[in-house]
Image (cartoon, rainbow, N blue to C red):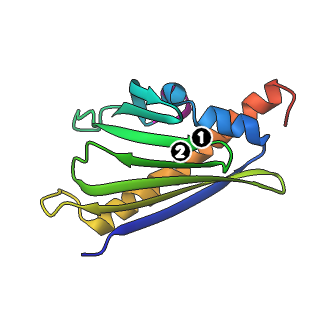
Amino acid sequence: MAGGHTENAIVIAAPMELVWTMTNDVESWPNLFSEYAKVEVLHREGDMVRFRLTMHPDKDGNAWSWVSERTANAKTRTVRAHRTELGWFEYMHLHWEYVEVPGGVEMRWIQDFRMKPDSPVNLEQMTNRINGGSPGQMKLIKEKVEQAAQRAGKS
């Protein structure tokens, strides 16, 4: 059974250190992403953080929640993460990359996943959902990081 794969990227006009710091501050994600209502850090060890993410309730009142582990590598400017509470996924692996480019920092999100057979959405539907939501979240993050850079005089 094939797995799903998505890749989405955006260039943020801000210094690498600011982009890296703001987007990897898991506790601040409810202020950075529009879809997350709450983050609860469960465990930290070195560069690894295990946390519970809870989304804002959907149109049916469901506040989806799951636990992920995320390891950020400041030297390579990459992040590896995976869900430990899988829900409807057989697996969900995430890879974030940050590369300095003309005009700022390209932030790329790569997701590899497979849906469980009894999931209410199939692989194509989940791929479309991720590709439908990620660009909007990235645009919002870009705006917030660029505003922070402007306030700091670092744009």
Residue depicted at 32% across the width and 37% down the height: 67
Name the element at disc 1: helix
Residue sitting nearer the eye, 13 or 143: 13
Residue 14 relative to residue 58: left or right: right
* Quadrant occupied by the N terminus: bottom left
Rendering quarter of residue 92: bottom left
Kindly state the secondary structure of the residue where label 2 is placed: helix
Q: Residue furthest front?
A: 46
* Quadrant in the picture for the C terminus: top right
Q: Residue at x 65, y 54 (%)?
A: 10
Picture quadrant of residue 17: top right
Q: Is residue 153 left or right of residue 75?
A: right
The image shows residue 105 at horizontal and vertical percentages of: 74, 50
Q: Amino acid at mark 2?
A: Gln
94 or 47: nearer the viewer: 47
- Give the magenta part as a residue range: 30-34
Residue 17 higher or lower than 79, as above or below: above
Snapshot quadrant of residue 38 = top left
Say which mark, if any, is on residue 137. Answer: 2
Residue 32 lies in the magenta stretch:
yes
Q: Which mark is residue 79?
A: none
Image coordinates of residue 141 in percent, x first then y, are 61, 39
**Marks 2 and 1: in contact by CB < 8 Å?**
yes
Residue 143: x percent and y percent?
Answer: 67, 38
Distance CA(mark 1)–CA(mark 2):
5 Å
Dominant SS type (magenta): helix
Q: Amino acid at mark 1?
A: Leu
**Residue pointed to by mark 1:** 140
